[in-house]
Image (cartoon, rainbow, N blue to C red):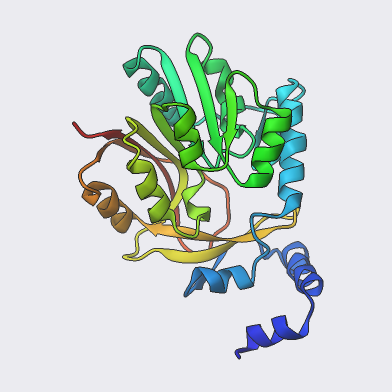
């Protein structure tokens, strides 16, 4: 038993979570930190993304956006001034243009509709169906409060694909928070959907992926969770070498203000199915 395991064994979880929160507030220990040997090691020293605090704060923010009280929400925080990622919008419009004005999005890890609500004014005039695949708590809240003729919520890829035929996959700041991101990406690519948009994803110049922890700034909510920082070359090799299913249309750099111990490049990319 190592030192960290001993502390976890002696102290109850509520004390450990309190210590983490104190470190974040008083020591400024937030942002992307650490370099862990496994996902489970990072999980042991983080709270996790499943926290109900995040869901409840996101629900409150999305309700205000849905009622036009606020402009949009990002990571549960209400924004007064819109900051669009126009490359992502271009990818969505490109998919719709190639499919007769139809935009049927499979938004994996799409929260309660953050990206849809953020960009909905640009989607007017299109036939839009926006399908979100999320954790059970989000799906339950989404179906109860936000589901309508456009916005739909599902627990799994299979459940979504049984109900509709998306023409674009959206992975907006999602892959880095999955324990097995390449398995999920491979499963999504196996659906043979025409377009894939990967947005707000962290990369670095090293040869291997890194496992870090993201400590959320305390003004947002008390939380921390494991995250990947992907090797740019490894990720590229995976996309290109995946049975030649998809090819790059464009990739682009995104400005992020998150502190990090590792030099990170935040990127997005648009892929399309190979002929």
Q: Is residue 168 left or right of residue 152?
A: left
Q: Position of residue 1 (x, y in %)?
A: 61, 91
Quarter of the picture containing the C terminus is top left
The front one of 154 and 48 is 154
Q: Is residue 69 left or right of residue 227?
A: right
Residue that extends furthest to the bottom in the rendered view of this protein: 1
Up-down: is 24 above or below 99?
Answer: below
Q: Is residue 15 left or right of residue 44?
A: right
Q: Position of residue 259 (x, y in %)?
A: 58, 57
Q: Residue at x 36, y 12 (%)?
A: 100
Residue that extends furthest to the front in the rendered view of this protein: 162
Up-down: is 102 above or below 75?
Answer: above
Q: Residue at x 55, y 35 (%)?
A: 132
Residue 194 seen in the current view: yes
Q: Residue at x 60, y 89 (%)?
A: 2
Q: Quadrant of residue 224?
A: bottom right
Up-down: is 171 above or below 229?
Answer: above
Q: Residue at x 39, y 42 (%)?
A: 188
Q: Quadrant of residue 235?
A: bottom left
Q: Position of residue 26 (x, y in %)?
A: 78, 66
Residue that extends furthest to the top in the rendered view of this protein: 125
Residue 254 seen in the current view: no
Q: Position of residue 269 (x, y in %)?
A: 37, 39
């Amino acid at each position: 038993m190592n030192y960290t395991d001993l502390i976890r064994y002696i102290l109850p979880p509520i004390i450990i979570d309190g210590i983490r929160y104190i470190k974040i507030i008083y020591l400024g220990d937030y942002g992307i930190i650490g370099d862990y040997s496994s996902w489970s090691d990072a999980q042991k020293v983080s709270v996790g993304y499943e926290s109900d605090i995040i869901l409840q704060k996101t629900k409150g923010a999305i309700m205000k956006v849905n009622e036009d009280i606020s402009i949009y929400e990002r990571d549960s925080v209400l924004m007064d001034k819109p900051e669009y990622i126009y490359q992502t919008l271009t990818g969505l419009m490109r998919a719709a243009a190639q499919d007769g004005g139809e935009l049927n999005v499979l938004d994996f890890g799409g929260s309660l509709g953050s990206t849809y609500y953020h960009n909905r004014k640009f989607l007017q005039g299109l036939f839009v169906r926006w399908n979100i695949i999320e954790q059970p708590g989000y799906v339950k809240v989404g179906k109860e409060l936000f589901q309508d003729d456009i916005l739909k919520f599902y627990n799994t890829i299979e459940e979504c694909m049984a109900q509709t035929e998306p023409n674009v996959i959206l992975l907006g700041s999602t892959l880095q928070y999955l324990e097995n991101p390449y398995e999920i990406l491979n499963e999504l690519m196996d659906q043979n959907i025409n377009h894939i948009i990967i947005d707000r994803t962290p990369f670095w110049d090293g040869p291997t992926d890194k496992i870090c922890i993201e400590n959320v700034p305390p003004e947002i909510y008390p939380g921390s969770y494991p995250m990947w920082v992907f090797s740019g070359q490894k990720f590229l090799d995976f996309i290109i070498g995946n049975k030649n299913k998809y090819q790059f249309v464009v990739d682009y750099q995104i400005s992020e203000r998150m502190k990090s111990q590792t030099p990170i490049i935040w990127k997005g990319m648009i892929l399309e199915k190979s002929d």
